[in-house]
Image: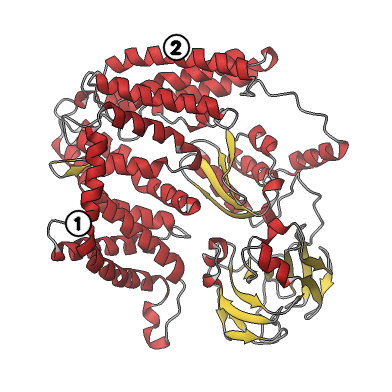
Amino acid sequence: MLGFLQRIGKALMLPIAVMPAAALLLRLGQPDLLDIPFVAAAGAAIFDNLAILFAIGVAIGLSKDGNGAAGLAGAVGFFVLTQGTQAINENINMAILGGILSGIVAGLLYNRYSDIELPDWLGFFGGRRFVPIVTAATMVILAGLFGFIWPPIQEFINSIGEWIIGAGAAGVGLYGFLNRLLIPVGLHHVLNSLVWFVFGEFEGATGDLNRFFAGDPNAGIFMAGFFPIMMFGLPAACFAMIATAKKEKRKAVTGMLVGIAFTSFLTGITEPIEFSFMFLSPLLYVVHALLTASAMIVAYVLDIRHGFGFSAGAIDFFLNLGLAEKPWLLFGIGIVYGVIYFVIFYFLIKALNLKTPGREDDDEEVSEEALQDYDALDRDKPAGSKYDEMAYYYIAALGGQENIKAIDNCATRLRMKVDDMSKINETQLKKHGAKGVMKVDRTNLQVIVGTNVEFVATAMQRQMGKKAPTTNQPAEPVEESDGDKSPIGDSDFVAPIEGKIIPITEVDDPTFAEKMMGDGFAIEPTGRTVFSPVDGEVLNVFPTKHAIGILSKQGYEILIHVGLDTVNLQGEGFQTYVKAGDEVKQGQKLLEIDLETIGNKAKSTVTPIVFTNLDEKEKVQIKQTGDVKQGAKGIINIK
């Protein structure tokens, strides 16, 4: 559930990213600035259609490949849902929530049906064209359902919003506290979407942010209190970290800390600062959350209203002065909070001996073998931009590309699924620019990079097709494929184990079901021996023995992953008979597995078989379903 909510939080960032442009156009066109009505109208158009933008943006954000077909399906779903529910009850107004719900449904349906094959006479409607159709059908059902159950849900949501708004200082304080506490798990975007875009209504505009720009005299209470924290408080925390740094390291960290302090002041982007201390001292982070809550309360008590299109930085502060109430008081409050932050951070860092930037212990003596490993990394780094270099070192520090199962990003952080969390080298990640590392659970990892994260993620994805070295384990020499592939015939690939064939989309793991690693199929095994399905060469045998990679003589890279979450068994229940570099023949024994151990201690025995280097247009077609014997031929086709 946490992982799913994080995906929604990440998806929400795409439509939210349009808000700065909308706010800029709306404000610049106002009479107190440039007085250009059509510019103001252009910005207002974005605010007036936020619900449909959320439907499109969330669908694309949740889709496995960011394809526009998902966005089209989101729009179709939104129209069907809203018009259908209002035909039943004209008082229903799903607004932004309707857009988010439509986007979620469309994104999930896209991931499941974008590769669907239909009979030849319906072939035109197959693949991505099928997604808007199935989304419309699904939303018709949901519209019929919500037409009757939504009114009490709408009343409940409105009552929560009215309570938070009506709670005054307590409401804004609670929101400010939770807003900061949810940042480590990336769920603050979900909370923000409710408060900024849903709660409260003024002349058709809903949410504190929308109502602020619509001229609601009571809006802005859930945004004003952030300005003292982001423009003054957290920058002062950076100066406290500089002051407490070791003398010999102070000069080195000053540039970095001053840079992220200025970023916070100017734009309101605070995560690089917060991640520099949140895991070193949860106490210090809770204090920060409480100070944020108190700033929200102070702004409310003084009847200060201010708002932003992006975040509470100087750009939004000055841009939206004309809409604000008592905004200059925020500067005085900010100076006071700057002093408070500096004193508290300085005292707690010293008292708790926190290893904030510049206070880290000197590196322990590094072995000669490790030094050679790092030297090899530096020597072999690719030529290119600084992001290519960062990506190269990140892949190595993450345990190599074999350890990275999926990679994505939001506004400031890389979001990844890894195979073995123990292989993550946090020191090397931070050495090459990471602001922090967060291990969400045993497979989900977040690396805080900063506002340039998208360029790093793109460079990493570009390099993921290459064999990256790793500083965590010896790299075994593997002959790489030249990328040329020849067709696989019915006799060239056989079932590697006895069991029941199931589509890859039915595997209970999104990494496989959404084909993040490639297309393929899965077998629910009844046999206990895994044989090679092809003639070829063993590319790698995972240290935990649960997975083997093979390069077929036709040029296809095949991953056999026995069970789900079996990496956590640390090799228990597996016996390998080959090693990386071995030549293998079709039907040669690769693994012996203990089904009872895997079934009792792992998530599932279901074994995905994935082709990891398929071309964009290639896909795996299952020709035989149900029970299959080991060695059975003609079970799949690649086309």
Please report the residue visible at 68 percent of the width from the left and 87 percent of the height from the top. Answer: 633
Q: Is residue 524 above or below residue 371?
A: below
Q: Position of residue 3 (x, y in %)?
A: 50, 52
Of all residues, the one furthest to the right in this rendering is 368
Label 2 Cα neighbours within 10 Å, binned few <14 / some 14-19 / many ≥20? some
Between the residue at mark 2 and the residue at mark 1, the CA separation in whole angstroms equals 49 Å
Q: Is residue 493 above or below residue 462?
A: below
Q: Position of residue 93 (x, y in %)?
A: 18, 54
Please report the residue visible at 57 percent of the width from the left and 24 percent of the height from the top. Answer: 256
Q: Which mark is residue 485?
A: none
Point out the tag, 2 or 1, that comes first from the N-terminus: 1
Label 1 Cα neighbours within 10 Å, binned few <14 / some 14-19 / many ≥20? some
Q: Position of residue 328 (x, y in %)?
A: 27, 15
User: Closer to the camera, 140 or 471?
Assistant: 140
Q: Position of residue 425 (x, y in %)?
A: 70, 41
**Residue 168 shown left or right of residue 481 in the figure:** left
The reply to whether discs 2 and 1 touch (Cβ–Cβ < 8 Å) is no
* Three-letter residue code for mark 2: Val
Closer mark to the observer between disc 2 and disc 1 = 1
Does dot 1 land on a helix, a strand or a loop? helix
- Say if residue 187 shows up in the picture: yes
Q: Which mark is residue 339?
A: 2
User: Closer to the camera, 143 or 270?
Assistant: 143
* Three-letter residue code for mark 1: Pro
Q: Quadrant of the C terminus?
A: bottom right
Please report the residue visible at 29 percent of the width from the left and 60 percent of the height from the top. Answer: 75
User: Closer to the camera, 482 or 75?
Assistant: 75
Q: Which residue is mark 1?
A: 151
Q: Is residue 612 above or below residue 256?
A: below
Does dot 2 land on a helix, a strand or a loop? helix
